[in-house]
Image (spheres, rainbow, N blue to C red):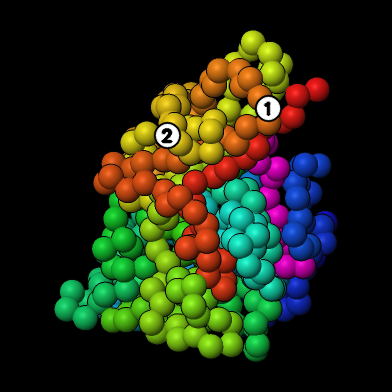
Amino acid sequence: MHKPADRSADDSVGMATYDPIPSKHPAFIFYEKEPYNGGPLPWLARGAYVTPHELFYVRCHGDVPALDAASHRLYVRGLVARPLVLSLETLRRDFPAHTVAATLQCAGSRRDELIRVEEIPGESPWTGNAISHGVWTGARLSDVLTQAGVDPDAARFVEFIGQDRTEKKDHPPFGGSVPLSKALAAETLLAYELDGKPLPLIHGFPVRAIVPGYIGARSVKWLREINVLDRPSDNLFQAEEYRLHPPTATRADHDSALAPALAECAVNSYICRIGRGHPGGKDPMVVEGYAFVGGHEIDRVEISDDGGVNWTGAELLPPPTDGPQAADEEGGRWSWRFWRAELPAAENVPVQIVVRAWDTAGNVQPERAEGLWNFKGYANNAWHRLVSAKAD
Ligand SMILES: Nc1nc2c(c(=O)[nH]1)N[C@H]1C(S)=C(S)[C@@H](COP(=O)(O)O)O[C@H]1N2
Ligand SMILES: [Mo]
């Protein structure tokens, strides 16, 4: 059992409680257990459209605080006319509940391919598995901010601060900020449910921010403070981490002020599995994966079986109309797309299968990971290449 919350209400910050974090699926890959970091094998990520909780990737920068839902408080402060102190009960009772299906993708997803370009010490080698899809229910952040009365002249950004102790020097809590316009958008939630169930502990219980389309880092878990600011957050994870440095910058020599803070996810796609059929035989090869973009929609997915010379369209599958996804109020705008393609049986196997997606703004994934390399290993959206299985 979890130890009783030892930092439930105000300022007490207690010890890490890892034991027992609900166990994940046997095919969940841990990069680290403290902090808790892992994701599903990619073929399992493509298994169910709404990711089962036991397969939902977990990205933690510190401990997993065991918060008590009854005594937890959320503070809304900064450039507001009426600062608020909200309990979970008031959040549920005083604000209409909204449900938004949103895919979360960590900026470090697909880092392993960047590591193959050049080493990235100290960062986990996530494959395309730092991504999962959930259906989130909570209060609209805009409803809460309206009640607090945002200063119309000075307010520009909204900061989220969690209640964890991160691994960084002096153990600051994890935090970040989003522009006021995104904070006021209908899709941005203070979520207390995932797929109709209470938020699991490791995913931010009892309440987290959900910022659909943005890198996962902006969806702050174990949310404790919401601050309306005239500038971006100076929390370490906004001011220093989760910024996109040029390939020339290094850990020892970089200027974070010159590197843009990551926000919306660029167009991306990934091959999760290749059905072998009979390699070298007559049956087509079945290739399946996901595509995701924040802020636009996936327009099309293309697939190549000759390393990216010739391309054919993959079939974009519609999101399910039943199950938790059916409650989405946003028409699937913040949801990943599953795709599937059949390729003629290759005469000579193995072949290099490549996927790339286009979004509705006409953006396409870049060809090579080489030009995307950065010393933090963020935001890899190069064409994804996989070599098909060898013939028996
Ligand atoms: N308080 C807090 N919030 C956090 C984090 C964290 O370490 N602490 N990690 C962030 C990062 S980097 C990501 S990618 C997502 C991961 O959400 P998940 O663990 O629910 O998948 O949570 C974000 N919110
Ligand atoms: Mo992340």
Residue 17 counted in the magenta span:
no
Expressed as whole percent of the image width and height from the top left, the position of residue 301 reads 42, 34
Residue range corresponding to the magenta coloring: 34-51
Looking at the image, can residue 34 be seen? yes
Q: Is residue 147 above or below residue 313?
A: below
The answer to whether marks 1 and 2 mark residues whose Cβ atoms lie closer than 8 Å is: no
What amino acid is found at the position of numbered circle 1 in the picture? Val
Q: Nearer the viewer, residue 146 or 216?
A: 216
What amino acid is found at the position of numbered circle 2 in the picture? Val
Q: Is residue 69 above or below residue 332?
A: below
Question: SS of the residue at dot 2?
Answer: strand
Query: Marks 1 and 2: which is nearer the front?
Result: 1
Q: Is residue 354 above or below residue 129?
A: above
Q: Is residue 81 above or below residue 208?
A: below
Mark 1–mark 2 distance (CA, rounded to whole Å)? 23 Å
Left or right: 63 in relation to 247: right
Residue plotted at (70% across, 55% down): 38
Question: SS of the residue at dot 1?
Answer: loop
Expressed as whole percent of the image width and height from the top left, the position of residue 6 reads 72, 73
Residue 329: quadrant of the picture: top left
Residue 211: quadrant of the picture: bottom left
Q: Nearer the viewer, residue 277 or 195?
A: 277
Expressed as whole percent of the image width and height from the top left, the position of residue 373 reads 53, 66
Q: For the view shown, which residue lies furthest in the left direction?
A: 153
Residue 19: quadrant of the picture: bottom right
Number of other residues with Cα within 10 Å of mark 2, as a class: few under 14, some 14 to 19, many 20 or more = many
Mark 1 lies on residue: 349
Residue plotted at (58% across, 78% down): 173
Picture mark count: 2
Mark 2 lies on residue: 301
Residue plotted at (52% across, 57% down): 369
Looking at the image, can residue 96 be seen? no
